[in-house]
Image (spheres, helix red, strand yellow):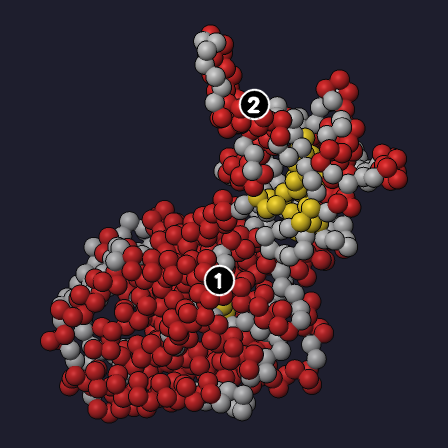
Amino acid sequence: MTDADDFCPTAEDGAESDQQHPLILQRVQEEPKSWQTVVSNRLKKNCSCTPKKAKSKILGFVPIVKWLPRYQLKEWILGDVMSGLIVGILLVPQSIAYSLLASQDPIYGLYTSFFASIIYALLGTSRHISVGIFGVLCLLVGQVVDRELALAGYLPENSILSSNDSSILLGNSSFGMDCDRSCYAITVGATVTFTAGVYQVLMGIFQVGFVSVYLSDSLLSGFATGASLTILTSQFKYLLGLKIPRPQGWFTLFKTWYSVLSNLQNTNVCDLVTSLVCLMILLPTKELNDRFKAKLKAPIPFELFVVVIATLASHFGNFNTDYGSGVAGTIPTGFLPPQMPLWSLIPNVAVDAFSIAIVGFAITVSLSEMFAKKHGYTVDANQEMYAIGFCNILPSFFRCFTTSAALTKTLVKESTGCQTQISGIISALVLLLVLLVIAPLFYSLQKCVLAVIILVNLRGALRKFLDIPSMWRVNRVDTSIWLITMATSALVNTELGLLVGVLVSALCVLARTQQAKVLKLGRASNREYYEDVSSYRGLQTHPGVAVFRYDAPIYYANQSLFKKSLYKSAGLDPLKEKSRVMKFKRKKEKQQEVPDVKPTHEDEAGVTLMENKSLRSVVIDGSSISFLDTAGVNALKEVRKDYAELGVKVVLAQCNTSVLDSLQRGGYYPKTESDGGEETVIFYTIEDAVHYVQNLSAANGDYDSKC
């Protein structure tokens, strides 16, 4: 950092400098509109209906009507059919398996995947994502179902009493003594799903799709990983064949492990052996699929092979009757008649449904936008809200549970040639075949096999732990958000983890504005460009003029920090300076009362302090100040006032229009010439501001003395 002599005006260019004028830009004046006019225009825009607008709305609400007529049959049909068949085959065992997480019978997982695939194909805007069962949402639904079952007085699933013996009379007229534990469980699940779908549709109606931006990738990833740990823990009882209820409340992970370890002596050897054999088959084969996915046209459905072989072994080996192994049980064919949600239950599950709705929507939109960007098309976040909302509302009448996009199956769809949501309809046809014909054949399928399928599919989420060192090197703040969200979701409570993640993300953003510092700027020697003198070499400063930049908005939470940082960077704190002067004056008055007391060295320094100070002007670069609130405007006014009392001029430069409007409304600029008309000059470049204060100093005879 050096002082440039050539910045001092000489006799030759003094006149030219005096005649220099700052850049003047004329603001576009918006015509003031009354609130009646604004409301009228909004109503005309949103409530008017023309044939063209009606057609656009219909096509926008049902996107398949728009893209299906332009379907390129020869180019796309093969990829869509192939991906639809593969995903449909994968969905069969996974739909049955994830029903365990949602505390539902296996048939309802098949229903859920079937309806979601069709509805999203009609209403969705993404060409590639696969909508259906998702492990995290199944876990959230299952926790609500188990809680409501306990509150309603139903005994645990593995109680010595049969489910029919644990029936109770419900207050709803459509339920009676014939509604057993399983019936009430799916009623609760469907009610939660209906409520979550209503939330999502309402968010679409009110155009609040933007809420997804508040759920960062690190937050969602941490939440999914934490929930995956809870899912992993919840499946160990099936791997060991233990008959223990799912714990409720907070710290379920610790409660579950305590129950598992306390009941190890009751392990079913048949289930344990079956689980180990299935793990030994599925883990390496899934790794082979991942390693050779570039060479394979489609992933080999090892899960389906394991399910078929395990079902045959269980059936002919009589694992259920001879060894007490838990099996899927009766899976009926066809569809049950539609049923209304249990309206009286909605107040009990409303809060849970809201968190489920947010998670489902955020994951769906995130995946939609990711694959749309990759393949060069756009998706509509609000339409995605409608699509996923109706994927929950309509199937809830057919006893389905909550759905969203799923990353694993979406990756399979993309890698097998998917072009449009026709592939989703093909997958639905595969599931329809299973529902109508094949489903009863899975009667003897062991639950431990389904638990193994769930565990194997958690590999991707659990691998995130291996990425922590690299994540930490890239961004420590995002990694901290990930770790806190993951730990809270896994160790305390799943829903609480999402809330804590949002709060921590907001606090991190707030903390960044609190940590911003005022930077002293210098000018490049051959350009009118200013940058931080502590970060770049060879920058030159102006004698008597200090240029500063603050890289954050100035508002109520950081306005005091801004002033402290500015005073520290300037090397001149006006408050301390005034206090020192007042102290000196009081001491001087006392000395006058006692004539024989001679002034000390500190007194002489105090007398000459203000006379010998080098700082004459301060230029604040406002280009990085995104907004000001009332406290921020007052802070700038206080800075200007405090420095003015010391004879230091403060001007602003390069402020955006929003900041200029805030300054104008806050009374920063005097309104009359008598108040000091020169203060109303607005500087659009730092160079103009510097020349302005230099000319003021030169006119007062101060600046020449410093050159």
**Element class at badge 2:** helix
Residue shown at the point (60%, 55%) measured from the top left:
535
The residue nearer to you, when weighing 153 against 254, is 254
Distance from Cα at disc 1 to Cα at disc 2: 51 Å
> Around disc 2, counting alpha carbons within 10 Å, would you say few (fewer than 14), some (14 to 19), or many (20 or more)?
few
Residue shown at the point (68%, 52%) measured from the top left:
539
Q: Which mark is residue 519?
A: none
Quarter occupied by residue 655 = top right
Could you tell me if residue 535 is visible in this image?
Answer: yes
> Around disc 1, counting alpha carbons within 10 Å, would you say few (fewer than 14), some (14 to 19), or many (20 or more)?
few
* Discs 1/2, front: 2
Say above or below: 71 vs 649.
below
Could you tell me if residue 433 is visible in this image?
Answer: no
Q: Which residue is the site of mark 1? A: 475
Say above or below: 348 vs 369.
above
Q: Which three-letter amino acid code belongs to the residue tagged 1?
A: Asn
Residue shown at the point (50%, 28%) measured from the top left:
576
Instruction: Return the x and y of residue 548 as percentages of the image width and height.
Output: 63, 42
Instruction: Return the x and y of residue 142 as percentages of the image width and height.
Output: 32, 63
Q: Which mark is residue 607?
A: 2
Say above or below: 103 vs 558.
below
Instruction: Return the x and y of residue 494 as percentages of the image width and height.
Output: 34, 58
Q: Which three-letter amino acid code belongs to the residue tagged 2?
A: Val
